[in-house]
Image (cartoon, rainbow, N blue to C red):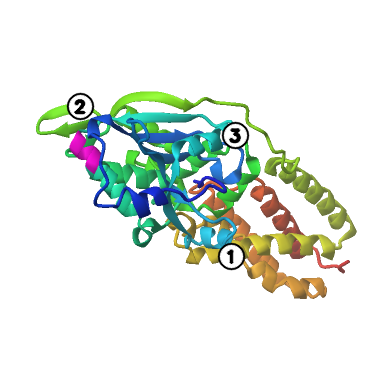
């Protein structure tokens, strides 16, 4: 989830001046609306899953109108991408004038839906003070986790914590997607983003999720809030008082990436591998350049997956793709380049392909990896069943 790009980390208005001052003249809570803002995705990679914020709006003339955003991050920070993958990224709460927030998403063509919360005056005041307290520098930073502690779950949690009663969700029958299935849905038009996610996500991403877990996605939380009730002292009231569109859907710019999809690249790799296998079999030789390329690609993927064992993200630690793609390929790369006989490696490689295929019964793999596995298996067959010279 993203912050407003280049946005001014505002509400120093709130932090340093009016909101924390003892002499600040609060408007009547009857004239205050607090809402959940749900932003539809746009084409930037960090926004493919949408975004969530909380709007605090004083309806009196000159009143504060701010979007509280738990998705503030610095993409240009040193090693941001690496820290993100390892679950070591810190996000923080920022606040912006709502018109600036709306302008940002209008520029991207992303619709923003506002759900006005059906809160009592006491609940509004408690939530307002909690947001202000969270905005303090000592409290604003938190350890981000994409599935378990993101800008959407933070907004949900602080709202629930300051409601006088219990929020009861209706739930959805027969809706128990896995994390991977939800990610696939959100990246359906971005095949390489889907490939990258599938490469890093492990077996835990293929378990069915609960309603609570599904609410890491803004659209799911929007749906659940729409159908939720607040239960207090034997009485029920809707969680949402009103729903409105504050930024209509616009035209989104499509940024064309690599022209081929992972599946198309996999098909090209498979055809190439089959042709070279036939040629090598007939010549009773192996092409060192070709198998070195396969080993380098497999080894690099394997090195990445090995590093994921140390990630703070639970869903990437146990990844069955490492059964085939691991640093072992890099260990044997130099002997293969030098043309030495390495039957032990190729036997291990054939066994790893078999284990990799068995693992696919329990975990979904990234597109194209099956063809890479098949190419490695074909090279293993050449080494194990032909004993001739190398090229």
Residue furthest toward the front? Answer: 23
Residue of label 2: 237
Above/below status of 376 relative to 253 = below
Q: Helix, strand or loop at disc 3?
A: helix
Q: Position of residue 123 (x, y in %)?
A: 21, 39
Above/below status of 90 relative to 208 = below
Q: Position of residue 307 (x, y in %)?
A: 55, 66
Residue of label 3: 107
Contact check, label 3 and label 1, Cβ < 8 Å: no
Q: What residue sits 45% from the left and 40% below the top?
A: 97
Q: Quadrant of residue 118?
A: top left
Query: Looking at the rendered structure, which numbered label has been put on residue 78?
Result: 1
Is there any visible trace of residue 239 in the rendered image? Answer: no
- Write the start and end of the magenta stretch as one range: 121-125
Q: What residue sits 78% from the left and 51% below the top?
A: 273
Q: Helix, strand or loop at disc 1?
A: loop
């Amino acid at each position: 989830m993203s912050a407003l790009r280049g946005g001014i980390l505002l509400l120093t208005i709130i932090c340093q001046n009016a909101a924390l001052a003892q002499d600040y003249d609060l408007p009547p809570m009857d004239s205050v609306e607090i809402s959940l803002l749900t932003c539809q995705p746009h084409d930037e990679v960090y926004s493919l899953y949408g975004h969530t914020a909380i709007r605090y709006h004083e309806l009196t003339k000159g009143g504060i109108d701010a979007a509280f955003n738990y998705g503030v991050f610095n993409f240009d920070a040193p090693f941001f991408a690496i820290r993100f993958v390892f679950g070591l990224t810190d996000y923080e709460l920022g606040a912006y004038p709502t018109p600036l927030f709306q302008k940002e998403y209008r520029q991207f063509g992303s619709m923003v839906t506002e759900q006005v919360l059906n809160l009592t005056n006491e609940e509004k005041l408690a939530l307002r003070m909690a947001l202000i307290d969270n905005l303090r520098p000592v409290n604003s930073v938190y350890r981000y986790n994409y599935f378990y502690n993101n800008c959407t779950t933070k907004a949900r949690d602080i709202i629930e914590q300051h409601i006088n009663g219990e929020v009861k969700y209706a739930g959805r029958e027969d809706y128990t997607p896995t994390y991977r299935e939800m990610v696939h849905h959100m990246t359906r038009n971005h095949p390489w983003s889907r490939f990258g996610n599938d490469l890093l996500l492990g077996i835990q991403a293929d378990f069915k999720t609960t309603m609570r877990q599904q609410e890491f996605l803004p659209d799911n939380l929007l749906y659940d809030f729409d159908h939720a009730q607040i239960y207090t002292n034997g009485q029920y009231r809707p969680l949402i008082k009103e729903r409105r569109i504050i930024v209509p859907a616009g035209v989104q710019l499509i940024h064309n990436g690599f022209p081929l999809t992972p599946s198309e690249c996999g098909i090209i790799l498979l055809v190439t591998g089959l042709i070279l296998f036939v040629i090598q079999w007939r010549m009773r030789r192996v092409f060192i350049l070709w198998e070195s390329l396969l080993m380098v690609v497999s080894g690099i993927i394997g090195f990445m997956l090995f590093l994921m064992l140390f990630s703070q993200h639970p869903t990437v630690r146990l990844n069955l793709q490492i059964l085939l793609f691991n640093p072992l390929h890099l260990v044997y790369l130099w002997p293969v380049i030098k043309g030495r006989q390495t039957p032990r490696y190729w036997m291990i490689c054939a066994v790893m392909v078999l284990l990799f295929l068995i693992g696919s019964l329990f975990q979904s793999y990234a597109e194209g990896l099956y063809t890479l596995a098949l190419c490695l298996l074909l090279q293993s067959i050449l080494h194990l069943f032909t004993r001739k010279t190398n090229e």
